[in-house]
Amino acid sequence: MRDIPVPSNLPAFIGISEEGDRVITPMLAGQNDLVKNLRALGNLWNVRVWFDQPVQIIVQRRYVWHDATPEERDSGYTRTASKAPSNIQVTDHVFRGGFFLHGDALCYKFKRTGRHGQYFPVDNVVKYEPVLTSDTCFASFEEFKKKFDPQFISDELVQKLWTEKSNQTGRRYCKNDFRSLGKQGRKTLTRFMENFKGITAGGPDAPGYTTHTKGVTWVLEAEHLSYRHPGRDIRISHTAGLDRVFYSSEYSGCGNGRYGLLVNKHEYLWLEDD
């Protein structure tokens, strides 16, 4: 493996976040391990890499439509879709999913939230640098806190989330961890707000709260059930006495999906997938 200099634009990333500073400082001090640096930078930012010759990169898999087989036509389909890789030949490329090790080999992910990837041509690298995008982490706690509506979450929990790492990504919560509510999510929230009066107002005497666990726990919830694949079952709920409102989007009838906290009337904070 060649000796590749650390990126010249690293000083521009100092001060963006505490975790970013912890990653960048050793590199500015001379840490020149290419694999280690790519993994660390890729956990926080997109990374542009230049190569000494055209290399093949597999970008995110896409759906390809094709005519139905006789068996599929018997089931009523005229066309069906399957996932196929999209290959490109490049001399430089922005890797948006981050990197991971498979044994001793460095791999790149197809997407940041994914669990699959492809071997990375590390021997062909001549230069690399992080790319500053809107997906970066927050510059300050005050900027982070502006995302949260206090009727859905307590100030104490917001402070705790600021110092914690995401179970899903292993890094501090960043801007792209806040996800917009979809059409059904917004409709579900509208029904939820008919009775929700804030995280301090729930209980047995509050409208809409029903008893769970033999009357010990009182919960207000609204849900959308899709009853079809690949639809999503949306649920928004508040348990009396808790300082947060939960949001979930599960595969229809499956019990697996995406989970988070409702932070305002337009977004939820993505905590994890299962």
Image (cartoon, grey):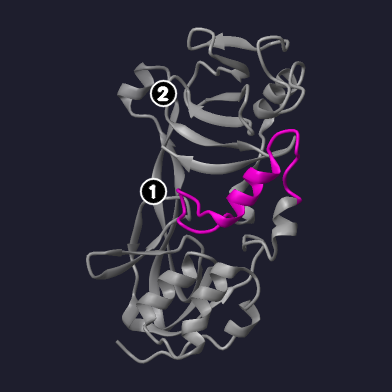
The image quarter in which residue 53 lies: bottom left
- Inspect the magenta stretch and tell me whether residue 58 lies in it: no
Amino acid identity at mark 2: Cys
Return the x and y of residue 257 as percentages of the image width and height. Answer: 46, 33
* Disc 2: CA contacts within 10 A as few (<14), some (14-19) or many (>=20): few
Region rendered in magenta: 146-173
Q: Name the residue at 66% across, 45% down.
A: 156
- Closer to the camera, 232 or 65? 232
Q: Is residue 101 left or right of residue 133?
A: left
Residue beneath disc 2: 254
Q: Name the residue at 50% across, 36% down.
A: 258
Return the x and y of residue 142 as percentages of the image width and height. Answer: 75, 58
Q: Earlier in the sequence, mark 1 or mark 2?
A: 1
Q: How many marks?
A: 2
Contact, mark 1 vs mark 2 (Cβ under 8 Å): no
Above/below status of 147 relative to 219: below
